[in-house]
Image (cartoon, rainbow, N blue to C red):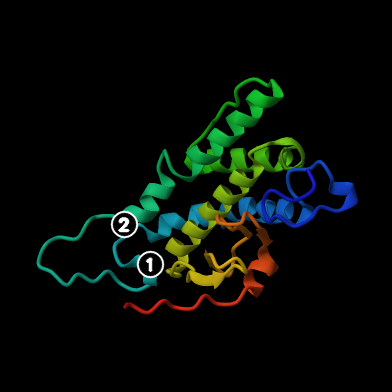
C-alpha cells in the first residue's frame, strides 16, 4: 500500500503498508469523539425532535392540521438502525476479523453509543493499519457526523462543485471532499489536489 485509501495522498515511509495516513486516522477519531458523550452530537439530537426546533425557535405550523409530533430526521438517527447500530455493526466486523467474542451492549442507546465509540477509538490505529475497508468506515463516520450536525445546527448540505479533470471528465466535489477518482482516466486526487482543479465549463443547451 503506497497511498492512503481515504484521501489518496502518498504515504510517508513509516506509513507504507497502512490503509490510511495519520491525518485521516486523526480526522476519523475526531468525528467519533464528536458523536459521543453528554454534550456530543448524538445527545444533542434529542433537543431537536420537536417540530420547528431545528432553528431554535418555537414550532410554527402553516396549516390547520396537527403537526407531526416529532421530527423524523433526528429521530431516525437516534433510533435503532441509526448512528448506534451503524457503529455497532462496524465494531462487530472488527471483532470477527480479530477473532474476538461478539461485543456486548448495556444500558440505553446513549450509553451504547458511548461504549461503541470508546471501543472503536481504542482499536482505530489497528483498523487504519490493517482493515481493508477503513476508507468506507472513515467515510461513513464522517457522514454520520455531518448528518447529526445538520440536524443540530440546521446547516445545509455542502454545496457540490463541478470541476474538470485534465482528461475532460467532470468531477463533482465539496469543500470537505477527502479525495476523488476520475472514472474516465482513473487518476486519483487528494483533498488539496481536487480543490485545485479548474471549474468545469457549463454546457449550454443546443
Asked which secondary structure carries label 1, the reply is helix
Give x and y (percent) for residue 75.
37, 50
Asked which secondary structure carries label 2, the reply is loop
Q: Is residue 42 left or right of residue 191?
A: left
The quadrant of the image that shows the C terminus is: bottom left
Q: Residue furthest left?
A: 64
Q: Residue at x 38, y 67 (%)?
A: 54
Residue labelled with disc 1: 54
Q: Residue at x 73, y 54 (%)?
A: 26
Residue 189 visible to an observer of this rendering:
yes
Give x and y (percent) for residue 77.
42, 49
In the foreground, 204 or 72? 204
Give x and y (percent) for residue 149.
50, 62
Residue 124 higher or lower than 175, as above or below: above
Q: Residues within 10 Å of mark 2 (few under 14, many from 20)?
A: some
Q: Residue furthest front?
A: 206
Q: Is residue 62 left or right of residue 119?
A: left
In the foreground, 114 or 191? 191
Q: Residue at x 78, y 53 (%)?
A: 22
The quadrant of the image that shows the N terminus is: top right
User: Which mark, by number, is residue 176?
Assistant: none
User: Which mark, by number, is residue 71?
Assistant: 2
Amino acid at each position: 500500500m503506497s497511498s492512503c485509501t481515504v484521501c489518496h495522498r502518498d504515504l510517508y515511509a513509516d506509513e507504507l503498508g497502512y490503509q490510511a495516513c495519520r491525518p485521516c486516522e486523526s480526522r476519523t477519531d475526531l468525528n467519533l469523539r464528536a458523536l459521543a458523550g453528554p454534550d456530543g452530537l448524538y445527545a444533542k439530537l434529542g433537543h431537536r425532535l420537536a417540530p420547528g426546533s431545528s432553528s431554535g425557535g418555537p414550532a410554527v405550523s402553516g396549516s390547520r392540521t396537527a403537526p407531526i409530533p416529532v421530527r423524523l430526521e433526528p429521530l431516525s438517527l437516534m433510533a435503532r438502525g441509526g448512528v448506534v447500530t451503524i457503529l455497532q455493526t462496524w465494531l462487530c466486523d472488527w471483532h470477527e476479523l480479530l477473532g474476538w467474542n461478539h461485543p456486548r451492549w448495556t444500558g440505553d442507546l446513549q450509553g451504547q453509543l458511548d461504549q461503541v465509540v470508546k471501543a472503536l477509538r481504542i482499536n482505530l490505529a489497528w483498523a487504519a493499519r490493517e482493515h481493508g475497508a477503513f476508507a468506507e468506515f472513515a467515510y461513513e463516520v464522517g457522514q454520520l457526523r455531518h448528518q447529526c450536525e445538520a440536524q443540530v445546527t440546521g446547516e445545509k448540505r455542502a454545496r457540490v462543485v463541478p470541476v474538470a479533470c485534465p482528461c475532460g471528465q467532470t468531477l463533482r466535489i465539496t469543500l470537505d471532499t477527502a479525495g476523488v477518482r476520475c472514472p474516465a482516466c482513473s487518476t486519483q486526487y487528494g483533498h488539496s489536489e481536487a480543490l485545485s482543479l479548474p471549474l468545469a465549463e457549463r454546457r449550454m443547451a443546443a
